[in-house]
Amino acid sequence: MNRGAAFKAVWTHPIWIRAMLWAKLPLAAFAGLRVRKLDDAGMTPECLQNSYGEMLGPIARPATRTAVLASVARMDLRAFAPLRRDMAEFDGLAAARNYSGPRFAIEAEGEENPFRASRLPGTKRIGIPGVSHWLMLDDPQATARALEEVLR
């Protein structure tokens, strides 16, 4: 299954799978916005580390920062570029319009990213305070409580 088909398949699975995958899909795709295409020819492991370091921001816990940057160091840049392209091309807004079930967005509290999933109409936002974009690594217990709230 190609990545585009995988994104589309999310909407055909039971609610618990959609809820789990919701957090993994790109927020820009859900918002129906296009991600600016980066120049992949100039992408280096150092550039990728710097980019993810910026995404981690000052709130990420040290263990989160270490885990994320270690994962980034293992990324295959040739595989990452088409994945990012597919995420940018996926029309998440159209997929969301075809989904009539409940919508929840578990997000870092205070994160005012214009691409966040909670901007979709009819989406209930559950904020977790004091965490970075990697909320499940920064505070697994709070993330689990938020998932329990969604799945009730």
Image (tube, helix red, strand yellow):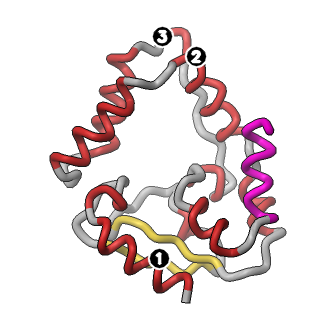
Note whether 102 is above or below 62 in the view shown.
Answer: below
- Name the image quarter holding the N terminus: top right
Q: Secondary structure at mark 3?
A: helix
Q: Residue at x 38, y 75 (%)?
A: 127
* Residue most extreme to the left: 62
Q: Nearer the viewer, mark 2 or mark 3?
A: 2
In the rendered image, residue 8 lying in the magenta stretch gets the answer yes
Q: Earlier in the sequence, mark 1 or mark 2?
A: 2
Q: Secondary structure at mark 2?
A: helix
Residue found at the far bottom of this picture:
152
Q: Assess disc 2: are there few (<14), some (14-19) or many (≥20) residues with their C-alpha within 10 Å of its C-alpha.
A: few
Task: Give residue 86's position: percent from left, percent from top.
Answer: 70, 35
Q: Amino acid at mark 1?
A: Leu
Please report contact status of discs 1 and 2: CB closer than 8 Å, yes or no. Answer: no
Q: Residue at x 37, y 70 (%)?
A: 143
- Magenta extent: 1-12
Q: Which element is circle 1 on?
A: helix
Gap in angstroms between the C-alphas marked 1 and 3: 39 Å
Q: Main secondary structure of the magenta part?
A: helix
- How many labels sit on residues? 3
Residue 147 is tagged as: 1
In-image side of 48 versus 79 (left or right)? left
Q: Which residue is mark 2?
A: 78
